[in-house]
């Protein structure tokens, strides 16, 4: 049933336009008013919408963060009466969109789908709510002391990001809230935070106001100014990249951007950065320093852009794979740009250099299990043999568990566990399943999981699994 806006009760039109109920008006009070006005059927029809429709399925935190970024990249203008992608473009609509609630809530009703949490429990994708006033997305802590955080919010003129002080926000009446249908995300393989360079912000309440820079990266340089630029038109993957600018003419002065992360000793890591420059590629460097418990370098790998054929027409990957030495506890990743001159024509140069960087990663190895069956089709009385290769080899002795999903069922039934054994080339698992008389014909799905993979530090993929399907005829 389609309804003209001018035929809706006042409460509905107010809610649609402003995203807030009229002061002193609750859903129950409005239902009573509409019932008295002979609008019982219409009120009952609209009540579920006014109360909100929540998604019964959990949204992962990395999905919340990715959705939050979309309105930053657009950027979406603020409005209490306009909708974008099905959500109202004010602060409440923005958070509703990030959480995929299916409906634009408001700052007086979020308590219906979110609950308060302690400050020290805040995780990316949670929120800070000042009831009846404003709500914002908590994007992540900036410092180890948890005093500063990255905030994404819709306040106007468009969606914005900033670095805010948690103590100031709490003193101003904000409370941490968590969406009731939010779920954790798998740990990323990239140890570097903001390796895609999407998150740009500057501190609130600091004077003079510093320029916005990629969060979680540290910038340094010589006595000359260290400059950066936020780039949208030259990117490798997403919507953002960073341009380092070195105004010096000396090839011995550097502009640096760096980040330090925790690593596991004697583990293989791959460092990668994509670069593009019209200047001398030998001035573009990527460094990987492994540090011990005293923060002293114990191993260094230096990469130069000229070896990767970095140029000004396309992005080139600068990468290396290296095993962290014994005693390594931290890794320092640094991108460097040497000074010099830039040619603007065949006969003219200008002082200084610049280079664009994007998609920077320090990737840990991925634990994996590859499952396969000895055939694709079977008949009653025959057995399917399931084998799988497992990495790392250190998984030998761990337990693999097989699950089966029968034809016409969506339920995974756990079968017996099988120890992972050593082979001449690594680690493997094996099990059999016999199709007994009376087995239902159709497609059988098998899934293998390796338990307790957290016991192998440095490897990503805890709880990893692999599946395969066969047909019983």
Image (cartoon, rainbow, N blue to C red):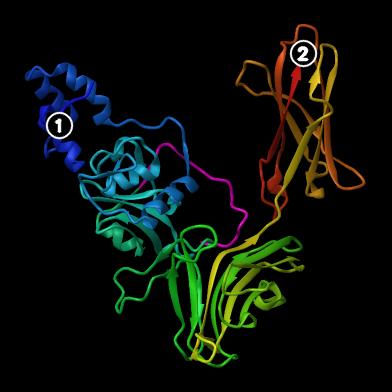
Residue 85, image x and y in percent? Answer: 34, 42
Report the disc number at residue 473: 2
Q: Quadrant of the C terminus?
A: top right
Q: In what element is the residue under mark 2? A: loop
Q: Where residue 257 appears, x then y in whole percent? A: 53, 75
**Residue 215's x, y, as percent?**
46, 66
Instruction: Tell me where residue 179 sits by quadrant.
Output: top left
Q: Which residue is pictured at 46% across the width and 83% down the height?
A: 226
Residue 188's disc is: none
Q: In the figure, is residue 273 to the left or right of 106?
A: right
**357, above or below 455, in the image:** below
Question: In the image, what residue occupies the spot 35% across and 39% down?
Answer: 114
Whether the magenta-drawn stretch holds residue 75 is answered as no
Q: Residue furthest left?
A: 37
The quadrant of the rendering that contains the N terminus is top left
Q: Which residue is identified by label 1?
A: 5
**Could you tell me if residue 296 is visible in this image?**
no
Identified at 84% across, 19% down, the residue is 383
Mark 2, Cα crowd under 10 Å, few <14 / some 14-19 / many 20+, is few
| Residue 36 at least partly seen | yes
The dominant secondary structure in magenta is loop
At numbered mark 1, what does the secondary structure look like: helix, strand or loop?
Answer: helix
Residue sitting nearer the eye, 383 or 469 = 469
> Does residue 363 lie above or below 427 as drawn?
below
């Amino acid at each position: 049933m389609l309804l003209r806006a001018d035929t809706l009760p006042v409460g509905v039109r107010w809610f649609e336009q402003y995203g807030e109920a009229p002061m002193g008006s609750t859903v129950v009070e409005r239902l009573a008013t509409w019932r008295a006005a002979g609008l019982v059927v219409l009120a009952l029809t609209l009540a579920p919408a006014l109360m909100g429709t929540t998604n019964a399925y959990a949204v992962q935190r990395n999905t919340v963060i990715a959705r939050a970024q979309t309105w930053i990249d657009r950027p979406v203008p603020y409005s209490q009466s306009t909708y974008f992608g099905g959500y109202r473009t004010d602060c409440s609509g923005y958070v509703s969109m990030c959480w995929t609630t299916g409906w634009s809530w408001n700052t007086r009703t979020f308590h219906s789908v979110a609950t308060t949490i302690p400050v020290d429990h805040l995780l990316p994708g949670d929120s800070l709510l000042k009831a009846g006033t404003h709500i914002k997305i908590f994007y992540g802590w900036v410092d180890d002391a948890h005093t500063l955080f990255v905030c994404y919010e819709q306040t106007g003129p468009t969606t914005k990001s900033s670095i805010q002080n948690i103590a100031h926000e709490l003193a101003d009446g904000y409370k941490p809230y968590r969406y009731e249908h939010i779920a954790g995300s798998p740990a990323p393989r990239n140890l570097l935070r903001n390796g895609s360079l999407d998150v740009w912000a500057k501190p609130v309440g600091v004077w003079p106001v510093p320029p916005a820079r990629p969060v979680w990266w540290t910038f340094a340089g010589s006595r000359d100014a260290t400059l950066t630029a936020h780039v949208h038109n030259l990117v490798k993957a997403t919507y953002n990249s960073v341009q380092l600018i070195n105004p010096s003419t000396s090839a011995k002065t550097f502009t640096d951007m760096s980040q330090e992360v925790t690593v596991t000793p004697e583990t293989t890591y791959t460092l990668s950065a994509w670069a593009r420059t019209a200047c001398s590629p030998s001035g573009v460097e990527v460094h990987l320093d492994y540090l011990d418990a005293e923060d002293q370098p114990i191993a260094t790998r230096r990469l130069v852009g000229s070896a990767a054929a970095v140029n000004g027409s396309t992005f080139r990957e600068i990468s290396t794979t290296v095993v962290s030495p014994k005693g390594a506890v931290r890794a320092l990743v640094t991108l460097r740009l040497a000074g010099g001159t830039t040619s603007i024509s065949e006969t003219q140069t200008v002082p200084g250099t610049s280079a664009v960087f994007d998609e920077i990663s320090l990737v840990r190895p991925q634990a994996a299990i590859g499952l396969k069956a000895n055939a694709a089709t079977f008949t009653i009385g025959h057995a399917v043999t399931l084998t799988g290769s497992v990495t790392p080899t250190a998984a030998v002795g761990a337990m693999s568990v097989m699950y089966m999903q029968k034809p016409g069922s969506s339920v995974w039934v756990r079968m017996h566990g099988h120890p992972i054994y050593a082979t001449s080339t690594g680690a493997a698992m094996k099990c059999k399943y016999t199709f007994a008389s009376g087995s239902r014909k159709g497609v059988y799905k098998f899934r293998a999981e390796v338990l307790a993979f957290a016991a192998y530090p440095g490897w990503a993929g805890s709880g990893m699994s692999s599946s395969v399907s066969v047909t019983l005829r």
